[in-house]
Image: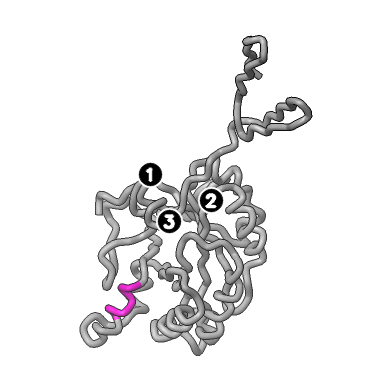
Amino acid sequence: MNNFPTSVIVPDFSVYDDAVDFVAVKKAGAAGVIIRAGQGIVPDAQLVRSSVEAPKAGLPIGYYWFLDPRVDPKRQAEAFAASVKDMQTDLPLFADYEAPDSWGGAFAGWKNLYNFLERLKQLTTHEIGIYTGYYYWQEHSPNPIFQSASLKYFAQYPLWMAWYAPQSLIKIPAPWTEMMFWQFTEGGQKPLGLDQNYFNGNLADFYSRFKVAPAAPATGRNITITENGANTVYQNVTTVDLKFADGTQKEV
């Protein structure tokens, strides 16, 4: 793949990034953010703060839940939905499917990812996607020959994939043919953070795809003019032209 757009950056953050300065993230050029909502049945310690501060900074926001194979996936879906229920949500809710095999657990494998997604669909109207890595998915997804129908099921969910190599080497795993987000590094620097992602499109595509509008920066000031005891407030302006009874004018 040589044509994945690289103009729209959407970093993702978790408790491991400490208290993120989302104003600085916005100024550094991020179009939006994806926040770790939790793992297992435990919400991320920074979730509440991030869900407030990111939108305040003018950043559209989405969330992901780290799927833990040691916990019932339906309970995890319920914890995810409950954690973000009253939070602003502009981007999808992602199932983070990448837990190492060394963790063990009674709920490993794609059938439990299926159970997680099906339960989450019952609990939210938000779009749902899947985060994974190419090789992880190859090893932990339905067999494309003997379980092709099960594999095709996952195509309904947009793909957010980690691939830390040149885009010319990117491989898209079946059943997908494209990615919504490409996580191109886990070694980024502040303020954009360690994990950085490109959106598959330009900025206009991003706003259109998620039905969000760019935040209008407050570049001016509020000016109050008092005339005959009545106040008129001009908001977010740089100047106001005044006309007086004698015909003179003044800019303030």
Q: Which element is circle 2 on?
A: loop
Badge 1 vs badge 3, beta-carbon distance below 8 Å: no
Instruction: Read off the residue under disc 1.
Output: 7
Badge 3 vs badge 2, beta-carbon distance below 8 Å: no
- The residue depicted at 33 percent of the width and 61 percent of the height is 179
Give coordinates of residue 239: x percent, y percent: 61, 23
Labels 2, 1: front one: 2
Looking at the rendered structure, the kind of residue marked 3 is Lys
Neighbor class of circle 2 (other Cα within 10 Å; few <14, some 14-19, many 20+) is many
Instruction: Read off the residue under disc 2.
Output: 59
Looking at the rendered structure, the kind of residue marked 2 is Leu
Neighbor class of circle 1 (other Cα within 10 Å; few <14, some 14-19, many 20+) is some
Instruction: Read off the residue under disc 3.
Output: 211
Q: Where 212 sits versus 216, above or below?
A: below
- Answer left or right for 108 relative to 15: left
Which comes sooner in the sequence, label 2 or label 1?
1
